[in-house]
Amino acid sequence: MRTCAVITLLVAVLGVPAGLLWAWLAPDVAYVVIRGRALPLDPEGQGPIAADGTFAIIAVVAGLVCGALAYLAGGAATTSRCCSA
C-alpha cells in the first residue's frame, strides 16, 4: 500500500510541471465576450485543436514515463497489486 501512495503522490506532483509545459507550448487562443458568452475570436482557426493535441501528446508521454518508472521501481507484481485493489 505504501508503494501505491508514493506512486500516486509522485504522479500528482509531476502533473504541475506537465501543466506548465502545456501552457508554455500550447498556442494562444483569443476569445471575445459577446452578450456574456466567450466565443473564439477566429472561429475557423486551428488554435483550440492544436492546444488539445499538445495536451494529448504531453499526457501520453508523461503517462508512459510514469508507468515505466512505476514498473521499474516496484516490479511487475507490486504494480499489478497496486492497480487491482
Image (tube, rainbow, N blue to C red):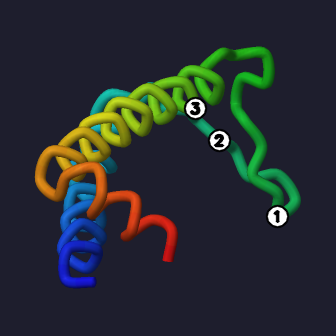
Residue 22, given in percent of the width and then of the height, sits at 35, 38
Q: How far separated are the C-alphas under marks 2 and 1?
A: 12 Å
Residue in the image at 21% along x and 56% along y: 14
Q: Is residue 70 found left or right of 44 in the rendered image? A: left
Question: As rendered, which of 33 and 28 lies closer to the eye?
Answer: 28
Residue type, label 3:
Asp
Judged by depth in the image, the label closer to the viewer, 3 or 2, is 3
Circles 2 and 1: CB atoms closer than 8 Å: no
The residue carrying mark 3 is 52
The residue carrying mark 1 is 36
Q: Earlier in the sequence, mark 3 or mark 1?
A: 1
Is residue 23 visible to the viewer in this orientation of the structure?
Answer: no
Judged by depth in the image, the label closer to the viewer, 3 or 1, is 3
Residue in the image at 17% along x and 58% along y: 74
Is residue 10 visible to the viewer in this orientation of the structure?
Answer: yes
Judge the density around disc 3: few (<14), some (14-19), many (≥20) Cα neighbours within 10 Å. Answer: some
The residue carrying mark 2 is 31
Q: How far separated are the C-alphas under marks 3 and 2?
A: 16 Å
**Label 3 SS:** helix
Q: Is residue 3 found left or right of 32 in the rendered image? A: left
Q: Earlier in the sequence, mark 2 or mark 1?
A: 2
Q: Is residue 26 found left or right of 31 in the rendered image? A: left
Q: Earlier in the sequence, mark 3 or mark 2?
A: 2
Residue in the image at 82% along x and 57% along y: 37
Residue 71, given in percent of the width and then of the height, sits at 24, 47
**Label 1 SS:** loop
Considering every residue shown, the one lying at the far bottom of the view is 1
Residue type, label 2:
Tyr
Judge the density around disc 2: few (<14), some (14-19), many (≥20) Cα neighbours within 10 Å. Answer: few
